[in-house]
Amino acid sequence: MRKYIALFTAVLLLSTSMAGCIDIHIFRDLFVPTEEEVIDYTTNRYNLMTKIFNTTLIPFNPDNILESYSGEFDVEIIPMTDSVLFDIDVQMESGEEVWEIINETWPGDLPDELEERVEQILEAASQRYIEVTITSPEGVEWFHARFNDTESVDTDRIQSPSEGEWKVYVDGVGVGPDATDFGIELAYHDSISIDVTIREPIV
């Protein structure tokens, strides 16, 4: 305590001798700590992208069973952002569910003209995938996953993310037939949806 009093006295004498007057604001700034700026935050969640695969089997063509997709999306992160989270939801129905629909329609053996087509549909369906890659503004890969089945993933929450444009790349091959010309309702569509949750300062 004595050390601070001595310091205060020395500064006081020096200021008096040099300027002839005392600026009280100088001493307030020297000895009274300033309060840190309070930042108000808001949490925003929005849909970044949604893709529903849709393929036609009428008229039947094995080349039309699969649909390819590729997309690139930007997520802008402003300075002082607290965190960002990506929520990835993939729906890829299995071949077993297709068989269940067919077996309900034909409890016995499949008609010869249908059997080959079903085999082609299931063969094509085995080639499906959806791939998601997320990179930072510096171009560093932060997340990568390849999906072959229904799955929901919340990425790790990124604390104090780098400001700038984060990139999200989505590539995939999916199916989404409405029906065959035999009237079988194949009521499934592969899909992917990505939501982004950002806790950022109010500007």
Image (cartoon, grey):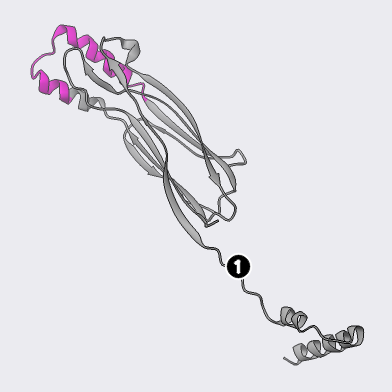
Q: Residues within 10 Å of mark 1 (few under 14, many from 20)?
A: few
Dominant secondary structure of the residues highlighted in magenta in the image:
helix
Disc 1 element? loop
Residue at 23%, 11% (x, y): give it. Answer: 117
Name the quadrant containing residue 90. Answer: top left
At which x and y percent is residue 76? Answer: 54, 44
Q: Is residue 76 above or below residue 111?
A: below
Name the quadrant containing residue 38. Answer: bottom right
Q: Is residue 202 above or below residue 144?
A: below
In the picture, the quarter occupied by the C terminus is: bottom right
Left/right placement of residue 181 relative to residue 138 reads left
At which x and y percent is residue 46? Answer: 42, 45
Residue toward you, 1 or 40:
40
Asked if the magenta segment contains residue 25, the reply would be: no
Mark 1 sits on what residue?
A: 37
Which portion, as a residue range, is magenta? 100-128
Q: Is residue 2 above or below residue 41?
A: below
Residue toward you, 162 or 77:
77
In the picture, the quarter occupied by the N terminus is: bottom right
Asked if the magenta segment contains residue 126, the reply would be: yes
Q: Amino acid at mark 1?
A: Glu
Residue at 30%, 9% (x, y): give it. Answer: 61
At which x and y percent is residue 50? Answer: 38, 34
Left/right placement of residue 68 relative to residue 103 reads right
